[in-house]
Amino acid sequence: MTTTATASTAPGYTLVEADPTTLDVAENVRDGVVITDDPDFIASIAAHGVQQAVSAVRRADGTLVLHDGQRRAFPGN
């Protein structure tokens, strides 16, 4: 995992590049989300990449808990 802080990073936030498979994904707040039901979303990510970063919170033990962006972190699921 690479941690990079930039001048554009908002105060109190750190930009982190992390392998999505290392994120702790809590229960999705949406019920019954089936990503394959939204082919336009998948096609958009395939064509343009993820354009809005996901957000996560680092626990005291160092793990990252996904806070926002489960579909963006795992578009193939």
Image: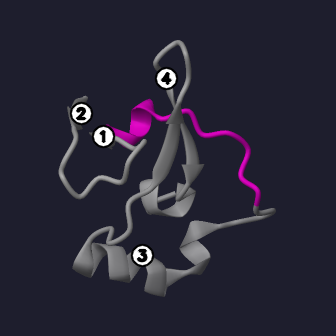
Residue situated in front as seen by the camera: 68 or 33: 68
SS class, disc 4: loop
Which mark is in front, 2 or 4?
A: 2
Q: Considering only order in the chain, which callout, 3 or 4, is on the residue closer to the N terminus?
A: 3
* Magenta-highlighted residues: 17-29
Where is residue 19, by image quadrant?
top left
Residue wearing tag 2: 3
Q: Is residue 29 above or below residue 20?
A: below
Q: Considering only order in the chain, which callout, 4 or 2, is on the residue closer to the N terminus?
A: 2
Which mark is in front, 3 or 1?
A: 1
Seen at 45% across and 62% down, the residue is 72
Q: Is residue 35 left or right of residue 31?
A: left
Q: Considering only order in the chain, which callout, 1 or 3, is on the residue closer to the N terminus?
A: 1
SS class, disc 1: strand
Q: Tell me the chief SS of the magenta region.
A: loop
Q: Considering only order in the chain, which callout, 4 or 1, is on the residue closer to the N terminus?
A: 1
Q: Tell me if label 3 and label 1 are in contact, CB under 8 Å.
A: no
Q: Is residue 6 above or below residue 26?
A: below
Where is residue 16, by image quadrant?
top left
Seen at 71% across and 52% down, the residue is 28
The circle on residue 16 is 1
Q: Is residue 69 left or right of residue 13?
A: right
Q: Tell me if label 3 and label 2 are in contact, CB under 8 Å.
A: no
Q: Considering only order in the chain, which callout, 2 or 3, is on the residue closer to the N terminus?
A: 2
Q: Is residue 35 left or right of residue 3?
A: right
Residue wearing tag 4: 63
Which mark is in front, 3 or 2?
A: 2
Q: Is residue 51 above or below residue 26?
A: below
Residue wearing tag 3: 42
- Going by the numbered disc 1, the residue's amino acid type is Val
Q: Tell me if label 1 and label 2 are in contact, CB under 8 Å.
A: yes
Residue situated in front as seen by the camera: 38 or 4: 4
